[in-house]
Structure formats: structure tokens, C-alpha cells
Amino acid sequence: MLEINNLHASVGGKEILKGLNLRIAAGEIHALMGRNGAGKSTLSAVLTGNPAYTVTEGTVTFNGKDLLAMTPDERANEGLFLSFQYPVEIPGVSMVNFLKAAVNAKRQYQGLEPLSASDFLKLKREKEKLLAVTSGMQNRSVNEGFSGGEKKKNEVFQMAMLQPSLAILDETDSGLDVDALRIVADGFNKIRTPEMSAIIITHYQRMLDYIRPDFVHVLYDGRIVETGDATLAQEIDERGFDWIEDKYKA
Amino acid sequence: MESTLLRDIRNEAMELTVGAGEQKHLVLLSPENGTLRIRQLRGSQLTLHVLSLSDADSQIQITVAQDESDCRTELYGLAFTRGKQVVDLETHVLHNVGGGVSCQLFKNVLADESRASFYGELKVQPDAQKTEAFQTNRNILLSTQAKMRTRPQLEIYADDVKCSHGATTGQLDKNALFYLQQRGIPLQEARRLLLQAFFEEVIATLPDEALQEEVREQINKRLNR
């Protein structure tokens, strides 16, 4: 479903990704671990089309299409979703209008009729029930006044509403206490379908206790240098990254 | 409060007195050239909206003098300039006597190579004690060629007062734009949502819902061109 070949990317004139390769099939959960600066967030920025980042070499295909040729909204409509590490607050843009615009943009892209106001509310209530959340949405602006945990829960809620085929969770566990982490992971597991894939970017093993990865990759100096299964994450938790990085230091 | 809608102001010089205890609301819809001088008498209330949503160049000067005590003045405005348009707004709010309150909120969005300016004189005389006066000007530039000139000019001679002013000029929040796009909303639509949100603070102060809707529509039309 996602195929990344020899990806080189830079930000602010500095090269961060230096030939990254990754293949993700439908339904697979891939964890991406590595130190700060290794390129984890750069990868999610490049995949989602953040204009601050430049791809200098390499290809990315998503469902057989050239992902890098698409605008950020086209990538989203194709089924790519990013749960941001720091979701931005957008005062004055109502949560409801925003979500309705997003849902209907995807539907339009797929050649479907937009949802009426009442159908949208039905969908919203259905997802609220699924995730066992109460709607705090009325009259609120996007993420305005939300705590860190609430923002992360809101990311998962948006994921439920948009039902992506590839979700990138960018350090979803950062800044969350254990309970909030549990809630976010449970939410993700409830939305998951057999065809849905995910890239879980994380520093810590904890998140992977709740969302079991099929593959664990270690990112070092802009490349994936090691791939294993869930036990690799355990080993990193016990031994850190040094033992891996030492193998690849120049 | 009843609103008086004034359209097609071209080369007009208007004078107005808001009498003791009176309330007046004026809405200037896309005025072109005009001077408006208003006197406020004891305990009166003035609300004024300047909404610049046409393609015309515009030079507007508004002077409000609180000549008697305990008056309230609220001045609001928005402008969405395009092409090579030039829109200049000058306000002079004069607290000549004490106990008065004034607040000003002007929001501008400048596209293409348009220019706008805001000159906000706020004068509080030595005997105008217990004055509360606030002035805010917020501007968004949609292109590198657009130019905003903002000059708050406060002269406060009384010492028992509360006065503040703020002026900022910037761009649409890049992080907010990207967030919206990552949720599938195309760039043009994302811009529209953010611009609507920006102007909403002023639109919400219009007392008439039908007028609010008309203003929102005009903003949409100007954005889509």
C-alpha cells in the first residue's frame, strides 16, 4: 500500500532523510523508533506534504499512485491521516464546520454526495458512541482551550470520522499520562479495521504495549537501519539505542 | 438600538451629534471618500461600523469627540483589499471630558498589491479622568506585495485612566493552514475558513443577523475571485 524508495528530504537546508526505504502492506502496524533528530517527524511531514520540507530524491507510492505529486489535501482524501504531535489551535473555526468540511471533501473526492447536516450529526454521534466520548464540540473552536490529552483524544476522534487507510501517529504518547495514553490507544484499536495500516512513531515501548506492532523499525541518521518485530521494541526499552547505532556509525 | 445603514458615501462631509442619553448606530458600507465628525453629549452611546468590501479606493476620516461625561463609543471596522486598491482609515477619538469609555477594533486583510493604512489618534485631555480607552488593529497580508501601514497615536494627559492599544500585522497561520489541508480541506477552502474566523470578531458585533450574513457572503465572493 505504501512504498518508500530511497527517500532523501531536507528542512531548513539541512538533509534529514538520507535514503529511507519502507514498505507497508494493508493492515500492517509499523512502529518507527529512534532518537530525536533521526528523522521520524521529518518522515511524517514529508509523507503528508508539509511545505516546509523538501524532497530531494526518491519516490513514494501510495495505492499505486505517486504520493509526492499530490497536494496535502489530496493525500488526505486518498486515505492518509496524521495524528499530530502538537495539534494546533484554530480559534474562530468551529469544530463542527471543520469536521464537516473534511468529511465532505473526502466524499467529493470519492465521487460521493456530501453529507447533509443531519447525516453528519448521525455520523458524529455514532463515532462518539464508539469511542465512548461525550460531545464537547458544540460551539467550540478547533482544539481551542484543549489540554494536551484532550487534543490527542480529538485527533483520534477525527480519525474515526475520516476512517483513513493509513494513519500516522506522530509521538502520540508524548505529553500524555498513562491513563490518557490508554484511552488514546483504546480509541485507535476500536477504529481499526483489517485493511487499515498505521505508522506509530514513538520513543517509548509503552504505546506499543497497547497497539501491538507487526514490525518495529529503528531510524538512525535518516535511514531505517534495523527492522524487527515487537520484541525489538522491548530490547530497545531495556538496552537503549546505542547497541544498534554503534553498528552503523561511520 | 436602531441602525442607520449608509451606502455609497462619496465625497461626503457629515456631522452628527448624539444627544444626551441617546444611542446611535451607524454602518458605513464600502464608503469611498468621507469625513464624519461626531459629537457625543452626556451619557450617550455611539456604535459605528466601517465595512470596506468593494474594489474602490477609500479615504475615510472619523472624528468622535466625547464632549460631555459618561459617554460610550464603539468603533469597529473590517476591510478586504485587492488588486491595487488603496484604503485609508483615520480615526480620532477625543476624550475631552471624563468618565467615558471607547473601544476600537479594526481588522484588515490585504491581498495582491493592495495597500491599507490605519491612523488611530486617541486623545485624553487632562481633565478627562476615569477614561477607559482601547484600540486594536489586526492585519493579515495575503501576499508579499501587499502593504499595511498602522500608526496608533495616543496622547494621554490625564493620569487616572485605563488605556491600551495593540497593532499587529502578519500572515495566515501556516500551521493552521497545513492542519486543515491534512484533513482533506483544499488550500483555498482552508484560507476561507481562517479568513472568516479572522473577521468573525468584527462581524459578530453587527446587531443585525441579515447584515452579518451579507458581510460574510461579500467576503466569500472577494476571496473566490
Image: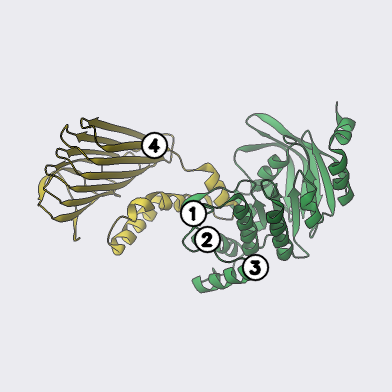
Chain colours: A green, B yellow
Q: Are marks 3 and 1 on the same chain?
A: no
Q: Earlier in the sequence, mark 2 or mark 3?
A: 2
Q: Position of residue B1 (x, y in %)?
A: 20, 60
Q: Position of residue B137 (x, y in %)?
A: 33, 40
Q: Secondary structure at mark 4?
A: strand
> Residue B168 shows which numbered tag?
4
Q: Nearer the viewer, mark 3 or mark 1?
A: 3
> Residue A132 shows which numbered tag?
3
Instruction: Give the residue at x 60% y 57%.
Output: A154
Q: Residue under mark 1: which chain is it in?
A: B
Q: Which residue is mark 1?
A: B189
Quadrant (top left, top right, bottom left, bottom right) of the C terminus of chain A:
top right
Q: Are marks 2 and 3 on the same chain?
A: yes
Work out whether residue A200 or residue A75 is closer to the camera in this orientation and state it.
Answer: A200
Q: Residues within 10 Å of mark 3 (few under 14, many from 20)?
A: few
**2 and 1 marks in contact (CB < 8 Å):** yes
Q: Nearer the viewer, mark 3 or mark 4?
A: 3
> Residue A101 shows which numbered tag?
2
User: Mark 4 and mark 1: span between their CA atoms?
Assistant: 24 Å
Q: Are marks 4 and 2 on the same chain?
A: no
Amino acid carrying mark 4 in the image: Thr
Amino acid carrying mark 2 in the image: Ala
Amino acid carrying mark 1 in the image: Glu
Q: Is residue A73 left or right of residue B55?
A: right
User: Mark 3 and mark 4: span between their CA atoms?
Assistant: 42 Å
In the displayed structure, A112 sits above or below B145; it is below
Q: Residue under mark 3: which chain is it in?
A: A
